[in-house]
Amino acid sequence: MALPDSWTNKPGGIPDYLETIKQAQPPERFSVKFLETLGYTSTNDRKFIAILKSLGFLDPDGKPTNRYYEYLDLSQSETVLAEAIRDAFSDLFAVNKDANKLSTEKVKNRLRTLYAGSKKDTVVNYIANTFTALVKCADFEAADSSVKPPPEPKIEKGGGEPSKQPPRTTLSSTNVPKLKVEGLQYHINIVLPESRDQAIYDAIFRALRDHLG
C-alpha cells in the first residue's frame, strides 16, 4: 500500500503535461532540463517530475520505466494512467475502491485520515487536487475491464488429477452375496418365573414345544 508525497499547485496544468509527454520523444533521463525543452520553465512545473515518479513512470533516477513507454501507446494511455493512479494511491483505494469517483472534498477528508497528521492541511489539499486532476485524464472503466479472473483449471479426458470422491459401489443381483441358512443355529434364553406351582412350568414348556417344534 502507498500514498504519494508528490503534488502540484498547478493541477490545471496536468492534462497539458501528460499530453506533451505523449507527443515528445522519451528522454534517457527525465530531468528539469528536459522539462524545460518541452516548454515548462517555471519552478512550479518541476513538481511534475516527482508526480511521474510516484506514478511509476520514472525510476528514482528519473529514467523512464516500462509504464512510461506503455503510456506513449495512445491506444492505452488512459488505461495505463488509471492503473498507475491505483498503485500510487493504493491506500486511498483500499478504503474506497471507487475513490476515483469521489469529489475533491471527499478525497481531502479521506486523505486527512490516512495521512494521520503527517501532512499539513494545505499539502493534503494540494495532493487531493492533484489526484482529482489525474483521475480526469484516466480511464478507470477500461482498466477495470482489462482485469480478468484467473481461468478455471481444465481436466482433460483421460488425464488430470483423479477425483477425490470415492467410487460408487453398485449392488446388483450378480454381486450380492447369498446368505445360506442351512446350518443356522439359534439359542433362546427363557427366564422362568418363581413359582411353587408345577402346573405353570408344565404350561410354559408345552407352549414352547407347540410353537417351536
Image (cartoon, rainbow, N blue to C red):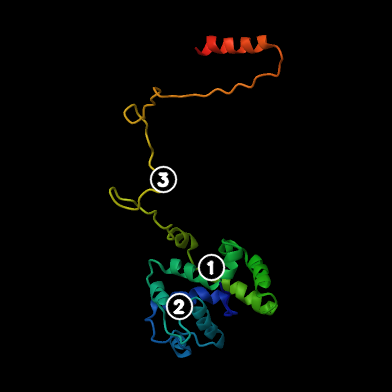
Choose mark 3 or mark 2, whichever is in front. Answer: 3
In this orientation, which residue lies closer to the viewer: 134 or 58?
58
**SS label for mark 3:** loop
* Residue 135, numbered circle: 1
Residue 67, image x, y percentages: 42, 74
Q: What residue is rendered at 65% in x and 19% in y?
A: 192
Q: Is residue 159 above or below residue 13?
A: above
Q: What residue is rendered at 42% in x and 87% in y?
A: 29
Q: Amino acid at mark 1?
A: Val
Q: What residue is rendered at 65% in x and 79% in y?
A: 123
In this orientation, which residue lies closer to the viewer: 108 or 187?
187
N-term mark: 2 or 1: 2
N-term mark: 3 or 2: 2
Residue 173, image x, y percentages: 34, 26
**SS label for mark 2:** loop
**Real-space CA distance between mark 3 and mark 2, rounded to the nearest whole angstrom:** 51 Å
Q: What residue is rendered at 59% in x and 68% in y?
A: 92
**Real-space CA distance between mark 2 and mark 1, rounded to the nearest whole angstrom:** 16 Å
N-term mark: 1 or 3: 1
* Residue 165, numbered circle: 3
Q: Tell me if I can see residue 132 in this picture.
A: no
Q: Is residue 150 left or right of residue 160?
A: right
Q: Is residue 197 left or right of residue 3?
A: right
Residue farthest to the left, as pictured: 158
**Is the residue marked by circle 3 packed among few (<14), some (14-19), or many (20+) residues within 10 Å?**
few
Residue 66, image x, y percentages: 39, 76
The residue tagged 2 is 57
**Is the residue marked by circle 2 packed among few (<14), some (14-19), or many (20+) residues within 10 Å?**
many
**SS label for mark 1:** helix
**Real-space CA distance between mark 1 and mark 3, rounded to the nearest whole angstrom:** 51 Å
